[in-house]
Amino acid sequence: MVATIWKCRKCSGSEFLQYSTRKTCPNCLLIRKQKYKLNKSSKNSDLKKTYGIDLVQYESMLEKQEGKCAICDGIETMIIRGKVQMLSVDHCHSTGLIRGLLCHSCNHGLGKFKDDTMLLEKAIKYLEMN
């Protein structure tokens, strides 16, 4: 089959090569797959209890970030029991305010630095020296 260049019917901005009858760009497909993986009822109550947001708000954030981590722009790769995990809800531990959705690696990286910008700046300077 010959590849054709299409504009995504979902976001209507992305152009991509199409080898089949699919008319949705890979980014939009990724977001749809991530949304589909959500266990709606239990995830909704977990989000409400832990972060004060519901699944609709989570999905809105996910779509706004195009299904990618707010720091590294990567997709989630953490697998538990054979399933790729959802992006983590990142929040300020002192105020509780939600900052965005992060992949497992970035979320844990910030946690290891205790959300301390001074420590992160020192780490950057250290990396730049070597």
Image: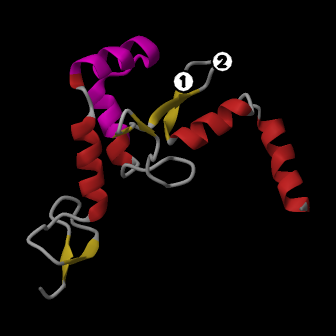
The one of 57 and 107 positioned closer to us in this rendering: 107
Badge number at residue 84: none
In the rendered image of this protein, does residue 66 appear above or below residue 53?
Answer: below
Say which residue appears at 24% left-offset and 65% top-offset.
25
**Residue furthest to the bottom:** 2
- Tell me the quadrant of the picture where the N terminus can be found: bottom left
Q: Position of residue 38 (x, y in %)?
A: 27, 32
Q: Secondary structure at mark 1?
A: loop
Dot 1: few (<14), some (14–19), or many (≥20) neighbours within 10 Å? Answer: few
Q: Which residues are magenta?
A: 41-61
Say which residue appears at 54% left-offset and 24% top-offset.
97
**Residue furthest to the front:** 81
Say which residue appears at 14% left-offset and 88% top-offset.
2
| Picture quadrant where residue 84 is located | top left
* Main secondary structure along the magenta-highlighted residues: helix
Task: Write down the residue under mark 1.
Answer: 97
Q: Amino acid at mark 2?
A: Ser
Residue at mark 1 to residue at mark 2: CA–CA distance:
8 Å
In the rendered image of this protein, does residue 88 appear above or below residue 43?
Answer: below
Q: Position of residue 39 (x, y in %)?
A: 25, 26
Task: Write down the residue under mark 2.
Answer: 94
Q: Amino acid at mark 1?
A: Leu
Q: Position of residue 13 (x, y in %)?
A: 27, 68
Q: Magenta stretch containing residue 3, yes or no?
A: no
